C-alpha cells in the first residue's frame, strides 16, 4: 500500500522523495508520512460505506493514532470526521479547521475543562459513565442541549493484546449493558442532553472477522431497546479496531471487506427488527495511518557477541516507538541506501536508551551495515509519534509529509531548548 520504490541510486523512495536525501535534509530519526497512502485509505473507508450502506454514514479518524495539525487537515479534507480523546486532541482538531459537527470527544475520565471546551466548541460528546452524565447536566447552561452519544461495553471478546482490548465486560470503558435501562431512562428525562446515538469499541489490531459483526448486531438490539424510552437514537458508532499487516504472517481483512461486513450486518439486523436505518459511523485509527508512515534512523554502533548475537544500534528507540517494549510488537525494516544488497546478516536492532529492553526488532534480516546507513522501519504511522516521549531527554523526531517528490515539515524536531522549556529552577537552587 505504501507508494514506495527503489530508485536508480539503489535507494528507497517514498512519495517520490529519496529517503537518504530526506535524512540529510531533515536529520534522523525522521517520521516520513506518505500523503497518498493516507488519502487512499481514507477513500477506501469513505467510499465503501457510501457504496454499501443505504443511509447516511460517516467515517471518523481515531486521531489518537497520530494527532497533529497536518494529519487532521488531510483526513478532514477527505470528508472524514475526527474522534478525539482529550482536550489536547480536540484543540488540535479545531485548530486544524475540522468542523465541530464532525468531531466526537471520547474519554473515560474527561475533566470539567475538557467538557466545557467540548460544549463550547459544539462537538459531540461520547458519554462514558454516570459521573460524566451528571457533570454534563450540571455544566450545560446554554439554551441548546449538548449533543451526546452513549458508550457501552458490549462484552465481546477478541483476540488481541490484553492492553488494547476494550470491549470485554471487565473494561474501564463505557456503561455496562446491565445499566442500559437506567441510563436510557435518565437521559430521556434530561432536557439538557440531546442523546443522538450509541457507541462501542471492542479493541485494536483485530484480524478476526466475527467480533465486529457480533458487535454491530448487538448494537442494533440496543437501538431497539432505546425506543422503549422514546429515545430516538439516530446514530450508531461501531468503533475502530481493524488490524494491519505488520509482518508476513498477519492476515487482517481489507478495509473494504471490513466496512462492507459492518454495513451488511447493520442493515440485516435493522430489517429484522423493523427499525429505520441509523446513521452509521466507525472510527478506525491504525488501519488509516499505520502503513502510510516509516521511521528513518541512522545506524551507529554495533556489538558482536560471538556465537550469540549482533546488536546494531540506531539513533532512536523506545522514545519514538514505544510499541515493541510495550506490546512486544513486531516490525519490518530495510536499509534505505542498500535496497538491493543481499540480506546476509541476522541482527538485533537496538535503540539508544538506557534500558536493555529497548529493542526495536529482534532477528532483523539485513544486508551488511555500517555506521551512517539509513535504517527504515515500516508501518510506524499509528501509535508511534502519538505515544512518543522524551525518555532520557531525547528530543522528539521531526516528521515530514511527502507527496509528488516534495517534502514538507509537519512536526519540527525538538531541540535541547525544548527539552528544558517547562523546567523551573526555584531561586534558592540557583
Ligand atoms: N475508538 C476508540 C474508542 C478507541 O479506543 C480506539 C483505540 C479506536 C477507536 C481506534 O482503534 P484502531 O482502529 O486504531 O485500532 N496504543 C495501542 C493501541 C491503543 C488503541 C486504543 N483505542 C497500540 O499501539 O497498539
Image: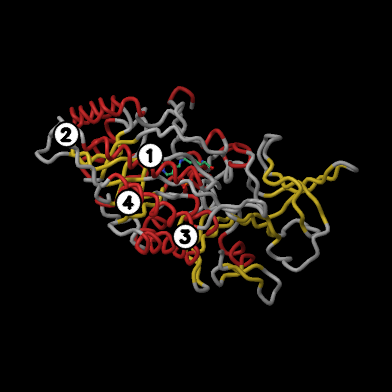
- CA–CA distance in space, label 3 to label 4: 15 Å
User: Of label 1 and label 3, which has the lower sequence position?
Assistant: 1
Label 3 near label 1: C-beta < 8 Å? no
Q: Is residue 5 left or right of residue 109?
A: right
Look at the picture and state if 216 lies above or below 26.
above
Q: Which residue is drawn at 71% across and 60% down?
A: 335
- Counting from the top left corner in percent of width and height, residue 67 is at 42, 49
**Closer to the camera in the image, 140 or 388:** 140
Q: In this view, does 126 lie to the left or right of 71?
A: left
User: Of label 4 and label 1, which has the lower sequence position?
Assistant: 1
**Marks 2, 3: nearer the viewer:** 3
- Counting from the top left corner in percent of width and height, residue 124 is at 26, 43
- CA–CA distance in space, label 4 to label 1: 14 Å
- Counting from the top left corner in percent of width and height, residue 334 is at 69, 59
- CA–CA distance in space, label 1 to label 2: 31 Å
Q: Which residue is drawn at 27% across and 33% down?
A: 113
Local crowd size for mark 4, using a 10 Å CA cut-off: few (<14), some (14–19), many (≥20) = many
**Marks 2, 4: nearer the viewer:** 4
Q: Which residue is drawn at 35% across and 47% down?
A: 269
- CA–CA distance in space, label 2 to label 4: 27 Å
Q: Callout 1: helix, strand or loop?
A: helix
Which residue is disc 4 drawn over? 280
Q: Residue 256 carries which label?
A: 3
Local crowd size for mark 1, using a 10 Å CA cut-off: few (<14), some (14–19), many (≥20) = some
Q: Residue 140 carries which label?
A: 2
**Marks 4, 1: nearer the viewer:** 1
Which residue is disc 1 drawn over? 218
- Counting from the top left corner in percent of width and height, residue 374 is at 68, 59
Amino acid at each position: 500500500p505504501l507508494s514506495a520504490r527503489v530508485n536508480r541510486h539503489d535507494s528507497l523512495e517514498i512519495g517520490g522523495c529519496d529517503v537518504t536525501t530526506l535524512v540529510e535534509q531533515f536529520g534522523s530519526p525522521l517520521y516520513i508520512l506518505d500523503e497518498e497512502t493516507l488519502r487512499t485509505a481514507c477513500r477506501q473507508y469513505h467510499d465503501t460505506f457510501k457504496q454499501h450502506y443505504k443511509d447516511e454514514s460517516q467515517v471518523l479518524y481515531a486521531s489518537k493514532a497520530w494527532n497533529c495539525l497536518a494529519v487532521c487537515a488531510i483526513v478532514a479534507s477527505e470528508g472524514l470526521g475526527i474522534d478525539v480523546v482529550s482536550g489536547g486532541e480536540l484543540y488540535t482538531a479545531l485548530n486544524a479547521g475540522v468542523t465541530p459537527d464532525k468531531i466526537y470527544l471520547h474519554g473515560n475520565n474527561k475533566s470539567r475543562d475538557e467538557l466545557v471546551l467540548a460544549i463550547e466548541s459544539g462537538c459531540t460528546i461520547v458519554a462514558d459513565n454516570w459521573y460524566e452524565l451528571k457533570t454534563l447536566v450540571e455544566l450545560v447552561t446554554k439554551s441548546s442541549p449538548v449533543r451526546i452519544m452513549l458508550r457501552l461495553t458490549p462484552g465481546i471478546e477478541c483476540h488481541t493484546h490484553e492492553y488494547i482490548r476494550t470491549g470485554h465486560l471487565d473494561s474501564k470503558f463505557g456503561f455496562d449493558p446491565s445499566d442500559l435501562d437506567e441510563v436510557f431512562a435518565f437521559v430521556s428525562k434530561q432536557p439538557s442532553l440531546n442523546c443522538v446515538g450509541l457507541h462501542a469499541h471492542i479493541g485494536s489490531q483485530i484480524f478476526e472477522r466475527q467480533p465486529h459483526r457480533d458487535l454491530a448486531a448487538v448494537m442494533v438490539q440496543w437501538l431497539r431497546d432505546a425506543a422503549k424510552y422514546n429515545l430516538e437514537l439516530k446514530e450508531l458508532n461501531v468503533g475502530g479496531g481493524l488490524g494491519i499487516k505488520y509482518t508476513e504472517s498477519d492476515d487482517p481483512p481489507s478495509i473494504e471487506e471490513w466496512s462492507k461486513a459492518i454495513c451488511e450486518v447493520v442493515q440485516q439486523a435493522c430489517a429484522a427488527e423493523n427499525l429505520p436505518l441509523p446513521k452509521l459511523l466507525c472510527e478506525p485509527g491504525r488501519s488509516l495511518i499505520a502503513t502510510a508512515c516509516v521511521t528513518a534512523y541512522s545506524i551507529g554502533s554495533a556489538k558482536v557477541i560471538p556465537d550469540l548475537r549482533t546488536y546494531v544500534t540506531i539513533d532512536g528507540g523506545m522514545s519514538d516507538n514505544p510499541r515493541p517494549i510495550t506490546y512486544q510488537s513486531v516490525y519490518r525494516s530495510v536499509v534505505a541506501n542498500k535496497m538491493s544488497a543481499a540480506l546476509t546478516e541476522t541482527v538485533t536492532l537496538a535503540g539508544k536508551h538506557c534500558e536493555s529492553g529497548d529493542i526495536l526488532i529482534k532477528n532483523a534480516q539485513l544486508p551488511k551495515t555500517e555506521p551512517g546507513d539509513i535504517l527504515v522501519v515500516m508501518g510506524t504511522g499509528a501509535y508511534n509519534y502519538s505515544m512518543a516521549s522524551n525518555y532520557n531527554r531525547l528530543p522528539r523526531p521531526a516528521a515530514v509529509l511527502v507527496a509528488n517528490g516534495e517534502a514538507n515539515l509537519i512536526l519540527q524536531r525538538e531541540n535541547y531548548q525544548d527539552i528544558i522549556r517547562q523546567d523551573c529552577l526555584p531561586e534558592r537552587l540557583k
